[in-house]
Image: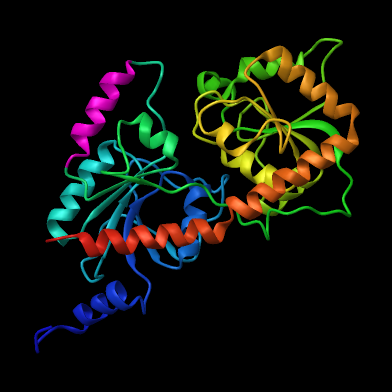
Amino acid sequence: MTANATPMAVRSILRRQQRQEPLNILTFCTHERYEQKLCKTGHNFYSINYGKEWDTDYGDIPENYYVINEVPSYINFDLILCHTACDRLRVSHNIKNDFNIPILLHMHVLPDIRNDVATQVNQFQIATANVDQKSFISEFSMKAWGSTVQDATFIEHGVETDFWSVDTEIERDNACLSVVNDWPNRDWCCGWELWKNTIAVNTQEALPVKVFGKSPGLSEPAQSIEHLRQIYQTSKIFYNTSLHSPVPTSLLEAMACGCAIVSTATCMIPEIIEHEKNGLISNDPNELRQFLELLLKDDQLAQHLGQEARNTMVNKYNLTRHIDNWNKIFYATIAAYKD
């Protein structure tokens, strides 16, 4: 360190090497619920208002998350966190040139199966060639985008199991709960038609259901995060019909709240749910219907599977593990960066 180092530079060194102060991270709003958890790392997140605005129907803005219209020059930033490989990645590179800081790209989505997957993977590899660190939401996602542990990493979900918990004083409704946003318009990835067919909507064989999520004309989102927790805690069964998602956050929250899980066996889900141990999974609509009917009748089995589902979240997908892994990649990205 030179004798004329500025106080800002000194603080930057302390943040990066000694971890004495929170990092200052530039980012873009992408997934509100996920970014709420990310803020629990304790760092300061400055979210550039570009491409998407934070939707408070999905969650409140944390105190250490600041929405900005311009990048302030008086803040000493440590890195850029970009959650997508879209135009925001181009903006990230422009910022990198001005601030001389690394870019960490964290991919949430999978290649869109409605279009040519090989072309998307090739374009992704080209677009991210100059990213300093690539990360994915799961090992499944990492492989789907053509990356390996030699050139990327992955950070699995984490659930705050002290908050998402079981309340034994609350009676559970004998119904099949689903929590999905914009469900009818996202049939290709969320399984709207599958849900309607297996539930047998508007027929004499229709199963009892509860539906929440921001889907105009169908369902409303929970009024608050506490309300959503109560929805899980008062539901006997959680029914997930996702077709093309690494793993829905709602599924993990429902598991932590002790719901008996019936789910499609797609993407990363079979890595989390072991059939007949901590949930019931299948890609056969007839089997899914049978599982729902079974749990509606069998309280003991539903309670057992719900407890095992929670045990999985507590032991393998807790928030502490998630936050520790994020902090490791933050500091590793900064330490490896050569300006």
Q: Residue at x 24, y 70 (%)?
A: 76
Residue 198 is left or right of residue 134, and the answer is right
> Which region is colored magenta?
116-129
Residue 257 is left or right of residue 174, and the answer is left
Q: Is residue 267 magenta?
A: no
Residue 1 is left or right of residue 177, and the answer is left
Evaluate whether residue 251 shows in this view.
yes
Q: Residue at x 35, y 16 (%)?
A: 115
Q: Vertical placement of 153 versus 117: above or below?
A: below
Image colouring: rainbow
Q: Residue at x 61, y 57 (%)?
A: 160
**Residue nearest the observer in this picture, 245 or 80:** 245
Give residue 222's position: percent from left, percent from top.
Answer: 68, 43
Image quarter of residue 271 = top right
Give residue 75's position: percent from left, percent from top.
Answer: 26, 70
Report the quarter where the C terminus lies: bottom left
Prevailing secondary structure of the magenta residues: helix
